[in-house]
Amino acid sequence: MCGIIGYVGRNSVLDILLDGLKQLEYRGYDSSGVALKCGDKIEVYKAVGKLNNLRDKLEPHRKNLLDAKMGIGHIRWATHGAPTIVNAHPQTCNCGRLVVVHNGIIENYKELRAKLEKEGCVFKSQTDTETVAHLVAQIYEKTQNLTQAVALATKELEGAYALAIMHNNEPNTLVVTKRNAPLVIGVADDGYYAASDVPAFIKHSNKAIYMKDNEIATLTPDSLTIQDGNGNEVTPKIEQLPWEPVALSKMGYKHFMLKEIHEQPDVIRNILTGKLHTSDSPIVLEEVKLTKDILKNLSRIQIIACGTSLHAGMIGKYLIESLCQIPVDVEASSEYIYRDTVTDKNTLVIGVSQSGETADTLTAIRQAKAKGSHVLIITNRPDSAMAREADSLLSVNAGIEVSVAATKSYIAQLTSFYLLAIYLAEVKESANKEDLIKLKSEMLAIPQKIEQILSHKDDIQNCAKKYSGTRDFIYIARGINYPTALEGALKLKEISYINATGYPAGELKHGPIAMLDDTMPVLSVLMHGRVYEKILSNSEEAKARNARMIALTNSIDPKLDDLFEYIIRVPEVDDMLSPLIAIVPLQLIAYYIAEFLGKDVDQPRNLAKSVTVE
Ligand code: M6R
């Protein structure tokens, strides 16, 4: 949940660290810090709040720091100890000669701290990371070899970590290691980079080495040595990275979120290319590595995910059950891992994750794999830990999503579920052929329909403005769009901090209706299809309690004008495909309300894009 970066080479390190941290801000942004090897000293600078505060703090010293050619940096999402200067990284040992930055959680830090304190270490922070600084420094005193000290110290650590460590006695050596947290090394002509994620160094190098758990890399300006957990040297596998730095630009949009919402039509087109050619040809999904015989006889599917990815999974359940008649359970990964889950080799387990690094989902899929289930991963990061665990990998290729609020990755996950469900139905011959042809044909038209919505976004902006003063918000829907209501509410909560809740519309009368009065906006997702009339009745019930009714609908029925005080109209679409259409206005409502309220849209408080702690 934090981001780390390190560099050793022939170039000035200061801006490499600051620019790299900027790209890692999605991992946390409550404080930051850098340590630079300057002459015979290590200089440490830290600041609370956004990265700009650190930049401002460094500015008066910039001239003196530009000669430094080795350094480490950190951007924090606090887990142990409040976001303060003292808890910000780099953390240091007693004498300040050893500095460390860390992403992850050292689970046995209390025991280690008690032991180290007895041995004379004086702790300054509340962090778990400081134990690593003292521990490695203590061992270094005996070994006088940083790599060896890190190797011995990490044997005592439990939990998750990606670490970058420097010692003042080793002017050209940076040591990095990881366990259950991402760490990637960038190889360049000018030296070596190490970071939690590739955007941190991609403008300097597109050659990467993804480190494996327990490996320790020793980096100098001219050499890279990697040893495994047993101390044996390993030959690194260098991969060519596909992403271009341009993916990280806002391209003229005010926020990444708005840009990413607008990218959605192309994201869908991209995914369909090569998989859905024409409506009457079958879906091609070579990524699914199960034989057709196994697929035909699948008895059960489990979908595990968190947050927005969980909502995509809920729609996946609806699709697979309707088209393939295979029972599907969907569960939040954080719940899945702490109960006696029944799964076996006849169950297909689908893990869904934008980042591919979410700790809860990673643990859940590992548990399922251990029980013999085939694990299919739907992710936006083919280079992630989950992708590497996958038996089948469905890469959604939405491109880097910078805004913390997931938008285009959600639509990409949904599109992947449609492809998967239709593919399974074709293999199993479980759905009417003509219906599938119609569905595929309509699917090909979805990008254009989203473009239509985006071209009328002023109307949605007006709606957002009208309701931006509200304290609470309710979203109601039924059937396949119930998860759409949940996702709309999550988007609003996370970027505007308005208390928003999604309900199955039929549940309103079982309790939530008590909250309704003339201050409460209730947004009905009212799409033509199986449950249209039902939601209409539920909307009438809410209106009868004076709620401020908003409709998101593809109906042009003039009677709606009496029931709803605001109507957002979207294009006509098949009931089953409607989640792809209905979510777009909800993303825009959340965006415009947050923007109108002056919130930090791309980096909402208390959140991080990649949640690598359980
Ligand atoms: O990377 P993942 O999809 O595994 O992340 C799961 C959630 O943390 C994520 O969807 C979160 O809810 C987003 N902030 C939603 O916008």
Image: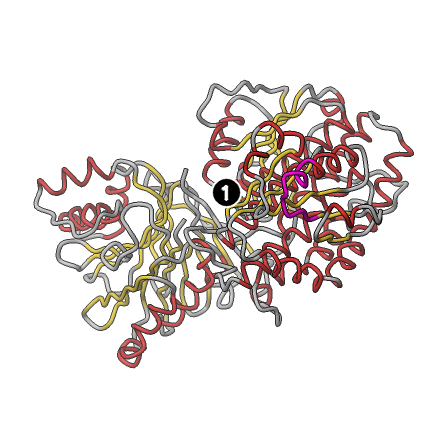
Residue 310 location, quadrant = top right
| Horizontal side, residue 235 vs residue 243: left or right | left
Whether the magenta-drawn stretch holds residue 544 is answered as yes
Where does the image place residue 235, in percent across and percent down from the top left? Answer: 44, 48
The amino acid beneath tag 1 is: Ala
Whether the magenta-drawn stretch holds residue 282 is answered as no
Q: Which residue is mark 1?
A: 385
Secondary element under disc 1, as helix, strand or loop, is helix
In this picture, is 613 found above or below 601?
above
Magenta residues (range) = 541-550
Quarter of the image that includes the C terminus: top left
Residue 472 appears in the picture as rendered: yes
Between 69 and 34, the one nearer to me in the picture: 34
Between 121 and 13, the one nearer to me in the picture: 121
Where does the image place residue 79, in percent across and percent down from the top left? Answer: 33, 46
| Horizontal side, residue 348 vs residue 108: left or right | right
Where does the image place residue 477, in percent across and percent down from the top left? Answer: 68, 38
Q: Residue, x 71% and y 61% (percent of image)? A: 459
In this picture, is 87 found above or below 38?
above
Mark 1 vs ligand 1: CB under 8 Å? no
Residue 489 location, quadrant = top right
Q: Would you call the spot at circle 1 few (<14 residues within 10 Å), some (14-19), or many (20 or more)?
A: many
Between 31 and 23, the one nearer to me in the picture: 31
Between 401 and 568, the one nearer to me in the picture: 568
